[in-house]
Image (spheres, rainbow, N blue to C red):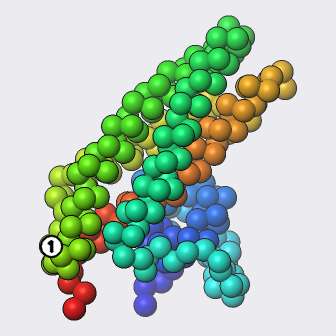
């Protein structure tokens, strides 16, 4: 059995999504950086690996209520992603754009970083909407067809590569926003709209992490080597 320290962090989370909370608490990227081993991820963040392993192993002793996404059929997982994460993105992006514009207009002279946040939100909105369309109209229908026909095969690798690149881009945008917002911490003079913007940005990032994890670490790898079930 592969030692936990040598497992890719994406594989660790794929086996038990509860581990995501532990990794996130130490700033360890299990989405776009899911291919790195736990040891390498901890080293890059200067985190004590034994502490992380201890917390991860403690989860095994507790009963978990999280879904085991790794056991789901690919067509069901694709539908879950669309119904939950895609719908969340479509709902939240207009809200983020509205508040980013409003707060930047009112407070941008005092806090110029708000203008940069606004522009990043606009870029994120454009990229993510195109990304969702590509998944729903191209990749996910391929997955459903293969599962429905119970065929051995795979989806087009070029599409998966492009989608993963787009995940990286969205992750970088949100990382920049997190830095500009001081970890989504509003200043003492922040009004209600200011606080709502930061709360929504943080919520969007948390959902994005799970969204990307389900695709990069579970859906995409399996879709690239789909096998018959009989």
Q: Residue at x 62, y 20 (%)?
A: 114
Q: Position of residue 24 (x, y in %)?
A: 61, 58
Q: Residue furthest right?
A: 188
Quadrant holding the C terminus: bottom left
- Up/down of 97 relative to 102, above or below: below
Q: Position of residue 125 (x, y in %)?
A: 45, 32
Q: How many marks?
A: 1
Label 1 packing within 10 angstroms: few (<14), some (14-19), many (20+) = some
Towards the viewer: 51 or 71: 71
Q: Which image quadrant for residue 169? A: top left
Quadrant holding the N terminus: bottom left
Label 1 secondary element: loop
- Up/down of 162 relative to 83, above or below: above
- Up/down of 73 relative to 217, above or below: below
Q: Which image quadrant for residue 48? A: bottom right
Is residue 225 left or right of 182 when viewed as pictured? Answer: left
Is residue 226 left or right of 112 when viewed as pictured? Answer: left
Is residue 158 left or right of 135 when viewed as pictured? Answer: left
Towards the viewer: 72 or 181: 72
Q: Would you say residue 225 is visible in this rendering?
A: no
Q: Residue at x 53, y 47 (%)?
A: 88
Residue that badge 1 annotates: 153
Q: Which image quadrant for residue 179? A: top right
Q: Residue at x 72, y 32 (%)?
A: 196
Q: Position of residue 6 (x, y in %)?
A: 45, 76
Q: Position of residue 52 (x, y in %)?
A: 64, 70
Q: Would you say residue 58 is visible in this rendering?
A: yes
Q: Residue at x 42, y 77 (%)?
A: 72
């Amino acid at each position: 059995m592969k030692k936990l320290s040598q497992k890719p962090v994406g594989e660790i989370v794929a086996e038990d999504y509860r581990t995501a909370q532990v990794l996130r608490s130490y700033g360890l990227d299990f989405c776009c950086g899911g291919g790195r081993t736990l040891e390498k991820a901890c080293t890059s963040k200067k985190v004590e690996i034994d502490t992380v392993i201890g917390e991860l192993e403690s989860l095994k002793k507790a009963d978990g209520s999280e879904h085991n996404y790794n056991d789901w059929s690919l067509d069901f997982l694709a539908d879950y992603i669309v119904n939950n994460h895609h719908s969340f993105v479509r709902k939240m992006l207009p809200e983020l754009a509205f508040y980013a514009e409003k707060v930047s207009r009112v407070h941008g002279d005092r806090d110029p970083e708000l203008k940069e946040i606004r522009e990043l939100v606009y870029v994120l909105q454009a990229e993510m909407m195109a990304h969702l369309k590509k998944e729903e109209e191209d990749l996910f229908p391929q997955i459903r067809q293969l599962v429905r026909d119970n065929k051995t095969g795979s989806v087009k690798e070029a599409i998966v590569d492009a989608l993963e690149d787009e995940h990286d881009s969205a992750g970088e945008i949100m990382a920049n926003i997190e830095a500009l917002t001081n970890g989504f911490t509003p200043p003492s003079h922040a009004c209600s709209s200011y606080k709502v913007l930061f709360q929504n940005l943080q919520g969007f990032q948390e959902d994005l992490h799970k969204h990307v994890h389900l695709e990069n670490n579970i859906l995409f790898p399996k879709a690239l080597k789909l096998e018959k079930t009989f």
